[in-house]
Image: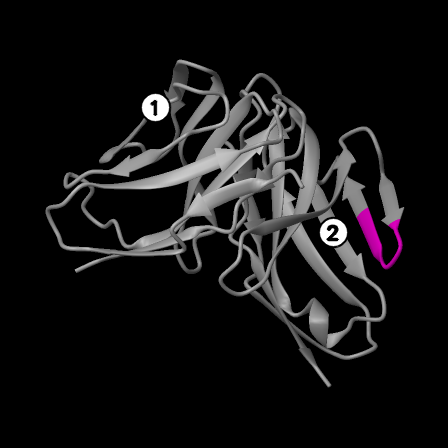
Amino acid sequence: GEDVEQSLFLSVREGDSSVINCTYTDSSSTYLYWYKQEPGAGLQLLTYIFSNMDMKQDQRLTVLLNKKDKHLSLRIADTQTGDSAIYFCAESINNQGGKLIFGQGTELSVKP
Amino acid sequence: DGGITQSPKYLFRKEGQNVTLSCEQNLNHDAMYWYRQDPGQGLRLIYYSQIVNDFQKGDIAEGYSVSREKKESFPLTVTSAQKNPTAFYLCASGKGANSPLHFGNGTRLTVT
């Protein structure tokens, strides 16, 4: 079945890079997404990558996809205290009506 | 500005009462989704609808009901049959398969 796994917590110092990792099981994933959730709010789409790409860069964000190992990562360069939030990875599966399968979320804590 | 509106932000109910959560979008999206979020468990899909007057059960549909009479609206009813209804409920919409989902700001339901 479909499953998406993330580690639950990550703590970094302000100015360092953060790397949030995600693994998924379904090889028919078409797109993989990263969302950010601040306390008490909905999910904000950060970036996404098509499954035939290896890397996507968008300002401070770099997404790496290793399709062979079914591993996705999100790197945030020069992490700021405003980046503290929960980060979710999600996959969309072909022929599944557009629904997304989410990981448990990684809580990123940025210390000054 | 286009977006998804969930109301109310906080909702309190007594056990045994049905309650309806509102979700409206003006993004002209065909597909709409309801997810439930519990701490440490990520997002779980309750119901989704790809087109008006049609909807499908997600992974945890028991104790919930939905309707999709208009493209813009996808209300969720939490019935008294739902054993553990206290949670954060998120509504989302999208263009359909292989497109990102856009989320509302959520409704926090507390049942005592």
Residue ID for mark 1: B67
Residue stretch rendered in magenta on the structure: A58-63
Q: Percent from the top left, x then y, of residue B62?
A: 25, 33
Q: Percent from the top left, x then y, of residue A15?
A: 83, 77
Residue ID for mark 2: A73
Name the residue type under label 1: Ser
Q: Nearer the viewer, residue A33 or B77?
A: B77
Q: Secondary structure at mark 2?
A: strand
Residue drawn at the location 25% of the way across and 49% of the way down:
B85
Q: Nearer the viewer, residue A86 or A55?
A: A86
Q: Nearer the viewer, residue B14 or A96?
A: B14
Q: Residues within 10 Å of mark 2 (few under 14, many from 20)?
A: some
Name the residue type under label 2: Ser
Q: Residues within 10 Å of mark 1 (few under 14, many from 20)?
A: some
**Which quarter of the image is occupied by the N terminus of chain B?**
top right
**Residue at the front extreme, as displayed:** B1
The number of discs equals 2
